[in-house]
Amino acid sequence: MNGMSERDYSNHSGMSRGAVQNAKRSGRLVFYADGSINAVASDARRMEMTDPDQQRRSFGGDAGMPTSGSGGTDSYLKARTALTVYQAQERQLAIQKKKGALVDRARAEALVFRLARQERDTWVTWPSRMAALMAAEVAAEVEKQSGQPVMIDATIMQRALETHVRAQLEALADLRVSLG
């Protein structure tokens, strides 16, 4: 007998006896004329014909897996690595979202829009609230400087303030918030 028996090849390759018989049926083993298994040639043929993922598992992970030589194995390993990296990044994002480090973009945009609207509404009503007070303060200051009694109409002051506030709000309206 030149080669190995199924049982011997099973021990040699680390495969179960059933896996050796499956490999025999599928043509992944090389035999001598006497029917015994040519271990060296069979190992090479199994490497060529077996799915790379199954080869890695039979070697006990990536440690014993040859990474150069055949382009198919290299590209398969690169694709698996890329998939693993992508899945890890996806999990990291999910963890950050649970911790509150990430927020929903639509929710953030809605919040910014609401805050900007509140700020605008506050400024639009500001001239009507402040016009009378400012008119009185300016009249008092002019009276103090000139010594003459002065009367400033609050509606004139309000119109002037509204004009300037609206001009400022229009300038601010051109600002765009980009969260992306």
Image: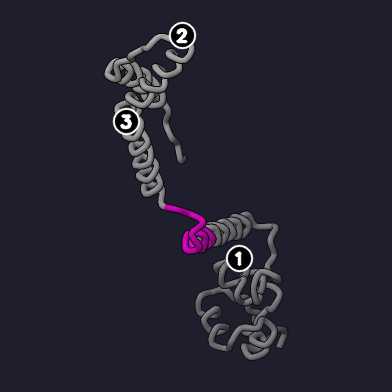
Q: Position of residue 68 (x, y in %)?
A: 70, 58
Asked if 168 appears above or below 110 in the picture, the reply is above
Q: Secondary structure at mark 2?
A: helix
Q: Is residue 31 visible?
A: yes
* Residue to which mark 1 is pinned: 48
Q: Secondary structure at mark 3?
A: helix
- Amino acid on which disc 2 is placed: Ser
**Quick one: label 2 or label 3, which is nearer the N terminus?**
3
* Residue to which mark 3 is pinned: 129
How is colour applied across the structure in the image? one colour
Q: Which mark is residue 146?
A: 2
Classify residue 97 as left or right of residue 73.
Answer: left
Q: Quick check: marks 2 and 3 in contact, CB under 8 Å? A: no
Q: Residue at x 60, y 75 (%)?
A: 57
- Amino acid on which disc 3 is placed: Arg
Classify residue 33 as left or right of residue 18.
Answer: right
Magenta residue span? 91-103
Residue closest to the eye, 180 or 127: 127
